[in-house]
Amino acid sequence: MNQKPLIDVVDQILSLTEDKDYPDNFAKQANVKEYERQIDQRVYQLYGLTTGLALEALDELPLMVRVIRNLCTIMAGAEPVSLPIEIQSEATNITSYGFSLSNGDHLVALWTDGVAVDEDPGIEATLTISGFPAKKVAGIDVLNGFEQQMITDIEDGNLVIRNLLVKD
């Protein structure tokens, strides 16, 4: 993979989010969502790896810093992999990336890839991951910093997650 200095990646992320044909004034959360997307995509594409950021000592973190910290914590040690994911939804713009974690678990990053908004109601989707009979699945919200156990089924050896709310 193309190995660029990290500062070049940050500059590229900033320029990509600034140059998009979006409304003149990004709302606070929408702007953070754009950075979050760009970090996932650029680190995956350019490095095939992830990095970490430790800022736990700060009591009041700006939203951008919290999201980057959450992303770095979740993605620490992750390696990009191709996962056999099928997404069924009314949305036609769901983006997903697969990762393998150092403990053998897998991670799927997904979102609706449109203009980010502050109060996205989300859209339901059904995710099917072929050959993954997982016993435990968690949904992680890096924007708001919480994790929730997901209700899943195993059908023909495939992991199925129904009624998954996918947001921008």
Image: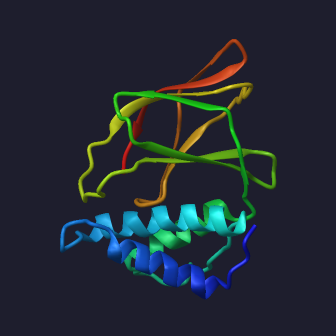
Q: How many marks?
A: 0
Front in this rendered view, residue 83 or 158: 83
Which residue: 72% across, 72% down? 2
Q: Can residue 72 be seen from the camera position used here?
A: yes
In the image: residue 19, left or right of residue 156: left
In the image: residue 9, left or right of residue 51: left
Residue 49 position by quadrant: bottom right
* Residue found at the far top of this picture: 156
In the rendered image, residue 71, in percent from the top left (x then y), is placed at 56, 65
* Residue found at the far left of this picture: 24
Which residue: 32% across, 68% down? 20
Please determine whether, in this image, residue 154 is positioned above or below residue 102. Answer: above
Quarter of the image that includes the N terminus: bottom right
Q: Can residue 65 be seen from the camera position used here?
A: no
Which residue: 53% across, 33% down? 150
In the rendered image, residue 100, in percent from the top left (x then y), is placed at 74, 50
Which residue: 35% across, 34% down? 91
In the rendered image, residue 45, in percent from the top left (x then y), is placed at 64, 63
In the rendered image, residue 110, in percent from the top left (x then y), is placed at 50, 46
Please determine whether, in this image, residue 96 is positioned above or below residue 29. Answer: above
